Amino acid sequence: MAKAATNALSSVLACSLFWTLASLSLLSARALAQTPDPAVEPPSAEPVQPVVVENADPLAEGPPMEEDASPMEICAQPADKNSTVLQRVRRSLTVTACASSAWLDGLFGDQIHYDDYHATYGTVTAGGLWSDYDGFDPRLRFRARLQLPQWDERISAFAGRVGEDDYISDTEGDFDALPTRQFGTLEDESVLLGLGYSSPERTGNDFDAGVGVRVDWPLDPYARARYEVVRTFAERYVFSARETVFWQNTEGFGTTTRVNLDRVISDRFLLRWSNLGKFTEETIGLEWYTQLTLFQSIGQKTGLAWQAQIEGATDNEVQLTRHAMRLIMRRQLTPEWLILEARAGVSWPRRYLYEKREASPEVGIAVEMQFGQKRDRIRPN
């Protein structure tokens, strides 16, 4: 009962946090313009058409912000009378995230960076994952990345309801909508706010860092830094290694090592061998997993991932804690900013000596809504 109440409170807090950003933008608009609120008409998202602002300077850096140029006006989009409820919700999320970026960035200068504000992006995901061993876990997540170009093009703000430990320790898998149970558990989500540093270009030797806080009482700050090396060889192989060092007030220090090897088989198939090890002051020895994933493209809108995984903990009473097989499908729906993720699989978990290792089936389904315009980091020619 207490866990259910905690999850419900966390969901309410997550939603209220996101709409608080919208309220801040509206308040700034009123203070600047001293006129009734402009219509809030939102932008676009991940694999979506670029956001277009009417009468905006096409350059990324515009003229000094005038008194009547509120964040909502900078990010507004023309209303479509024929839009569905879902489209209006998405537009509201997009404009809210864009206006929040403009409002925060306005604290550091008086220039209007239209393109950067509209490069703000995020996702909202709802679904559930069930297994015979762990039971049912409902999932409600959101992420928003806010651009702050007047501070520095390498700095961005983050707000999200995510798997706290996975996000901070950098143990998240390839799929966010329905995260895979790592190291025997699927943790509860937490609301995190933070600032991140990363270069806009990928060079193959990339450094990222971030600081933030878990929105809880008492507040729980965290920091992390990671370095990644990526190398391509023999035309069809890509090797990557990433080291992450992190600290959280309630958990102490820790480190995560991740090594991947990709092999392009054909235009439709890619094979990835992933290996990860995590150690923290709270960990029972080294937690690790090794995973083999065959990615398969089926047409332009559907992708499959065939996975086999083994995981364990070196100091646990049962060192091999789980092996599993699963099939994950991601399909682009109509409209294209909706993604369906479904999975089915079976695992053989055992964490304690008194447990019997038995097959545990699992199924899950989630829908992901993408909003804003994601601008991927690019690799120089």
Image: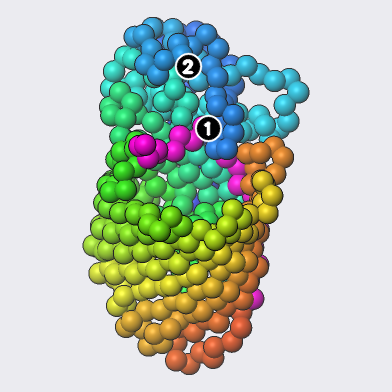
> How dense is the environment of label 2, judged by Cα within 10 Å: few (below 14), some, or many (20 and up)?
many
Q: Which mark is residue 372?
A: 1
Expressed as whole percent of the image width and height from the top left, the position of residue 118 reads 48, 26
The local secondary structure at tag 1 comes to: strand
Instruction: State the CA–CA distance, disc 2 to disc 1.
Output: 14 Å
Left or right: 91 as drawn, with respect to 194 = right
Q: Residue at x 59, y 87 (%)?
A: 358
Which of the two discs, 2 and 1, sits closer to the camera? 1
Magenta residues, start to end: 361-381
The C terminus sits in image quarter: top left
- The residue to which callout 2 is attached is 74
Q: Of the residues shown, which amino acid type is indicated by label 1?
A: Gly
Residue 316 visible (yes or no)? yes
Q: Is residue 27 visible?
A: no
Percent x, y of residue 26? 47, 21
Q: Residue furthest right?
A: 82
Helix or strand or loop: what does disc 2 sit on? helix
- Would residue 377 be counted in the magenta stretch? yes
Q: Residue 183 got which mark?
A: none
Residue at point 56% right, 34% down?
45
Residue drawn where x is 37% and y is 79% of the image: 313
Q: Amino acid at mark 2?
A: Ile
Mark 1 crowd level (few <14, some 14–19, many ≥20, 10 Å Cα) = many
The quadrant of the image that shows the N terminus is: bottom right
Q: Is residue 151 magenta?
A: no
Residue 306: image quadrant is bottom right
Is 17 in front, or is 91?
Answer: 91
Residue 241, position as x, y percentages in the image = 33, 59
Q: What colour-coding does the image apply?
A: rainbow
Note whether 299 is above or below 271 in the view shown: above
